[in-house]
Image (cartoon, grey):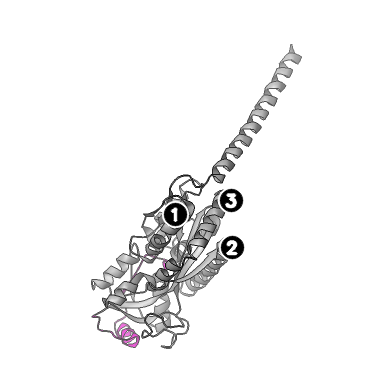
């Protein structure tokens, strides 16, 4: 009787192991089949900023081309808040199946450096598929602001420490780093007013509620063209081709005052490699399109079009640069 019970126990154990093994293989085959068929439904491209900013413009320019190459709709979904934090967490909460793409920008790299509650890490939690564009930051004031030159603004700021304000897309964003670096380089004290996106930060300057902001050129190109904003300087070594009359911070005597924004795209870790490869190829091809390149370049963005491996190295370097700035300026996590 005991021998019979043991035999039955062994049989059920073998059956359970075989069933589990078969189910694992079957699930793997289904996943492989689904990945090979990718994409077979619409894809969402999450932009963690408000509409109208540089990240939003970049996503909306490229998404139609990527959609045409993939044969599926690529819908841009804005999820602003926390200077990119809310949108990034929203992407992390979706399945790693390739049907969610996250727009990646400097604030998502710097947020963990300045906010103790931010636990994501772009290198750990996402896989870069493309580093699309870069754009230098500018020192921007309202068109009828009393300061017509960088020297005049700095002189005013020194006379009234803490009274002049600057806006940014949020604590830890590129404009925040630019503003703090500006204060350190120019020996001034400006009050930081964080907002939920480039568009609100720029609008606050347009309305005269904030004195200055430090956005990427691509986000304020139209305002400069229309004459509603004034650029006191380009935070770079080179002048802009489109607005060559705007001086650089380097030629004004601030060689260390160089900052830029950039835009890329990533998917969640554990996304099937076949899906990643298809997305990487689609973004690479889309950014080779002459018409698209001209649109980017005429709105202040330089097309980089770096594929996954190069994009990862680019973002890693930017992170290291921001760590150095955060330490030098003692920008401790809040």
| Residue 21 position within the rendered picture, expressed as x and y whole percent measured from the top left | 66, 33
Residue 42 seen in render: yes
On residue 309, which mark appears?
A: 2
Query: Which quadrant of the figure has residue 64?
Result: bottom left
Q: Nearer the viewer, residue 331 or 214?
A: 214
The alpha-carbon separation of the residues under discs 3 and 1 comes to 19 Å
Q: Give the tally of numbered discs.
A: 3
Q: Nearer the viewer, residue 227 or 183?
A: 227
On residue 285, which mark appears?
A: none
The alpha-carbon separation of the residues under discs 1 and 2 comes to 23 Å
State the quadrant of the N terminus.
Answer: top right
Q: Regarding mark 3 in the picture, which secondary structure is present there?
A: helix
On residue 273, which mark appears?
A: 3
Residue at the image position 48 percent from the left and 59 percent from the top: 265
State the quadrant of the C terminus.
Answer: bottom left
Q: Regarding mark 1 in the picture, which secondary structure is present there?
A: helix
Provide the residue designation for mark 1: 67
Residue 331 seen in render: no
The disc, 1 or 2, on the residue closer to the chain's N-terminal end is 1
| Residue 104 position within the rendered picture, expressed as x and y whole percent measured from the top left | 46, 61
Q: Nearer the viewer, residue 295 or 317?
A: 295
Q: Is residue 266 left or right of residue 158?
A: right
The disc, 3 or 1, on the residue closer to the chain's N-terminal end is 1
Q: What residue span does the magenta drawing correspond to?
A: 144-173
Q: Nearer the viewer, residue 243 or 102?
A: 243
* Residues under numbered marks 3 and 1 in contact, where contact means CB atoms less than 8 Å apart: no
């Amino acid at each position: 009787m005991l021998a019979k019970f043991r035999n039955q126990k062994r049989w059920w154990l073998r059956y359970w192991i075989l069933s589990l093994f078969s189910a694992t293989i079957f699930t793997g085959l289904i996943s492989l089949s689904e990945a090979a068929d990718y994409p077979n439904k619409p894809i969402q491209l999450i932009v963690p900023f408000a509409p109208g900013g540089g990240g939003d413009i970049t996503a909306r320019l490229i998404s139609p081309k990527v959609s045409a190459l993939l044969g599926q709709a690529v819908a841009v979904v804005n999820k602003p808040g926390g200077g990119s934090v809310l949108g990034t967490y929203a992407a992390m909460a979706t399945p790693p199946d390739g049907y969610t793409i996250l727009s990646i920008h400097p604030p998502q790299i710097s947020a963990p450096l300045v906010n103790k509650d931010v636990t994501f890490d772009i290198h750990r939690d996402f896989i870069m598929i493309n580093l699309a564009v870069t754009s230098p930051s500018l020192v921007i004031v309202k068109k009828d602001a009393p300061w017509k030159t960088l020297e005049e603004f700095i002189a005013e700021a020194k006379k009234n420490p803490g009274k002049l304000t600057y806006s940014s897309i949020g604590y830890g964003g590129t404009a925040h780093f630019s503003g703090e670096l500006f204060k350190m380089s120019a020996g001034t004290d400006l009050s930081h007013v964080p907002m939920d996106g480039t568009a609100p930060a720029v609008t606050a300057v347009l309305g005269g509620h904030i004195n200055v902001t430090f956005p990427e050129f691509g986000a304020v190109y139209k305002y400069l063209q229309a004459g509603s904003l004034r650029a006191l300087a380009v935070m770079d070594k080179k002048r802009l081709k489109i607005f060559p009359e705007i001086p650089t911070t380097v030629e004004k005597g601030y060689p260390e005052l160089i900052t830029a924004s950039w835009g890329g795209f990533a998917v969640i870790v554990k996304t099937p490699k076949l899906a990643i490869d298809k997305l990487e190829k689609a973004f690479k091809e889309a950014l080779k399109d002459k018409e698209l390149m001209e649109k980017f370049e005429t709105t202040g963005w330089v097309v980089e079009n770096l594929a996954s491996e190069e994009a990862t190295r680019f973002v890693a370097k930017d992170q290291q640069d921001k760590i150095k700035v955060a330490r030098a300026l003692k920008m401790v996590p809040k």
